Image (cartoon, rainbow, N blue to C red):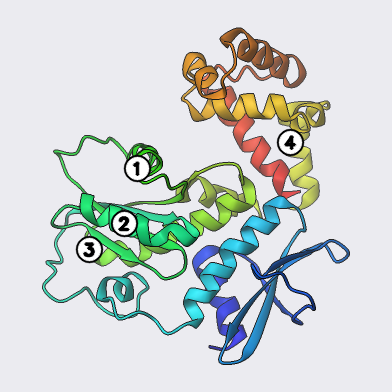
Amino acid sequence: MQAERIIKQIKSLCGLDIEQVKPPENMPENGVMADEKNGITVFSVSRDGRVYSFAVKGADKSSMITAALAREYVFGLMIKQPSDPVCDFLLGLCGAPQGVHVGKSDYFVFAVYSGAGSKSVTEYLMTMAGENDFVADMSDGITALCKVSDNDTDYRSAGEFAAVLKENLSEEIKEQVKIGVGGVAHGVSELPKYYAYAKSALVDGAEFDPNGDIYSYKEYALIKTLSVLTSADKERYVKTVLDRSYREVLSDEELMTAADAFIKHSLNISEASRHMYVHRNTLIYRLDKIERITGLNIRNFNDAMTFRLACLVYKML
């Protein structure tokens, strides 16, 4: 597969801009290397005795994670595709597998990244899958899961199911995963599109929230829209929303960890403090400090969402 085709497909499916670069010397075994001098992170994939190297912008920890996930994705595109008909179908290489009823059932669609642990994750998901669910090892460190969502489901949303799934994988087979949530596909024919959304969420999540573990395509769809703004417009927005001293909050790891945990646990102080292993009064103190500096009381839903969006826009600068 030509490098130009890879670049175009990555851009189309994930919205990630990569460029082909000269293969660097002394590339680590994991195939990813930060080039701080040029402000890029390079990743390499070998095929048929030839090395293809690409780069993403940035040379920090977030860029390293993004490049590692992009490398897995490119590797999956370049190797011979597996014969698994479900895998081929979800990649858009063929129609629905033979014998599958193309009905109107809704499906929660996920891309579960576990790297070297993908085999055990796939096996676990297959044991828990229902008769009409789809599970496939996508050969790039990712397992696809398309779970039927009907009126009898115990889960109100794909995000809620993803949270339970992550906890089960951690407890049952000791695998730490990152989950891309594609959303709800309306019928089998939409599964390839929503699986592409789920993979795109993984890549975008690694870039904007490397410490997270569940990424929703819907959230990053908004980010993609905002990314076309100029840097000046983005900075003006952040300054307006968070006030002039916003850098004091965004550079404070304790405050950002507190805000992330609080928002992640549905603005529930007790749940957030328990998962952070800190006293609730400590968390309250940190939330109060954020309010004093930014003017946003993130215990209020609207302020919490405004703060979250402003933080994401800041990461685009």
Check residue 21 in the rendering and tell me which mark sits there, or answer none: none
Using the numbered discs, state the Cα–Cα distance from disc 3 to disc 2 in whole angstroms: 13 Å
Q: Name the residue: 65% across, 16% down.
A: 287
Q: Earlier in the sequence, mark 2 or mark 1?
A: 2
In the figure, is residue 124 to the left or right of 261?
Answer: left
* Residue marked by disc 1: 165
Eye-nearest disc, 1 or 3: 1
Quarter of the rendering containing residue 37: bottom right
Tag 3: Cα neighbours inside 10 Å, few (<14), some, or many (≥20)? many
Q: Secondary structure at mark 3?
A: helix
Q: Picture coordinates of residue 214 (x, y %)?
A: 47, 44
| Cβ atoms at labels 2 and 1 below 8 Å apart | yes
What's the amino acid at mark 2?
A: Leu
Using the numbered discs, state the Cα–Cα distance from disc 4 to disc 3 in whole angstroms: 41 Å
| Cβ atoms at labels 1 and 4 below 8 Å apart | no
* Residue marked by disc 3: 188
Q: Name the residue: 64% across, 29% down.
A: 257
* Residue marked by disc 4: 238
What's the amino acid at mark 3?
A: Val
